[in-house]
Amino acid sequence: MPTIHFLREQLHIDCQAGVILRDLALDTGVQLYGFKGRLGNCGGCGQCSTCFVAVASPKETSCLSSRTAPEQRFLKTRPSNWRLACQAVVQDSMVVVTRPQSGWSGGDEALAAAATAMGSPTQGNAPPHQNHGNHKSNQEDGSGADGDALASGDTGEEKLST
């Protein structure tokens, strides 16, 4: 079961492979959007480019699906580890920085260090885990709907009920 470490929020989320990163973030209360994105986003259709994330994986394998056509268009001048969360399907554990265009403490070095630490057997003072294993992906429920769930205001301090 993949674990997603949201670095800015200091939150670990366990989820099933096949979930869309945007849906997972919003369902667990992670603030994915900056001010402009909160005012107007496309709802996960890959048309607005407001759900930027930077990702790193503790393994050499790809932690997300391949870039989609909208990502190729919107991210052509961005770093190769940037993705649109609404287009990224989780395949393996990773570290995610939300709103990377705003900068983050430690920059790319902190992202790489967090990914390396995530792959080690001991994670030291790891933030609390949430089990989000019951989250269904488009592929699992067959609806094709993207499940535009709203953030519930969870602080990430307590475990989600499954």
Image (tube, helix red, strand yellow):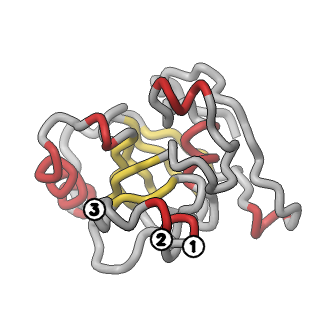
User: Can I make out residue 57 in this image?
Assistant: no
Please state, as top left, top right, bottom left or bottom right, where the C terminus lies in the image.
top right
Q: Residue at x 23, y 37 (%)?
A: 103
Q: Quadrant of residue 104?
A: top left
Q: Give SS at disc 1.
A: helix
* Image mark for residue 69: 1
Circle count = 3
Q: Report if the CB atoms under discs 1 and 3 are less than 8 Å apart.
A: no
> Label 2's element?
helix
The answer to whether 140 appears left or right of 45 in the picture is right
Q: Position of residue 81 (x, y in %)?
A: 32, 63
> Which residue is farthest bottom?
61
- Which residue reaches farthest right? 143
Q: Residues within 10 Å of mark 3 (few under 14, many from 20)?
A: few
Amino acid type assigned to the residue bearing label 2 in the image: Gln
Residue marked by disc 3? 79
Contact check, label 2 and label 1, Cβ < 8 Å: yes
Q: Crowdedness of circle 2 by 10 Å Cα count: few (<14), some, many (20+)?
A: few
Task: Pinpoint residue 61: horizontal percent, then vertical percent.
Answer: 36, 80
- Give the side of residue 159 with respect to residue 138, left or right: left
Q: CA distance from mark 1 to mark 3?
A: 16 Å
Rendered position, 52 above or below 17: above
Residue at the location (16% across, 45% down)? Answer: 107
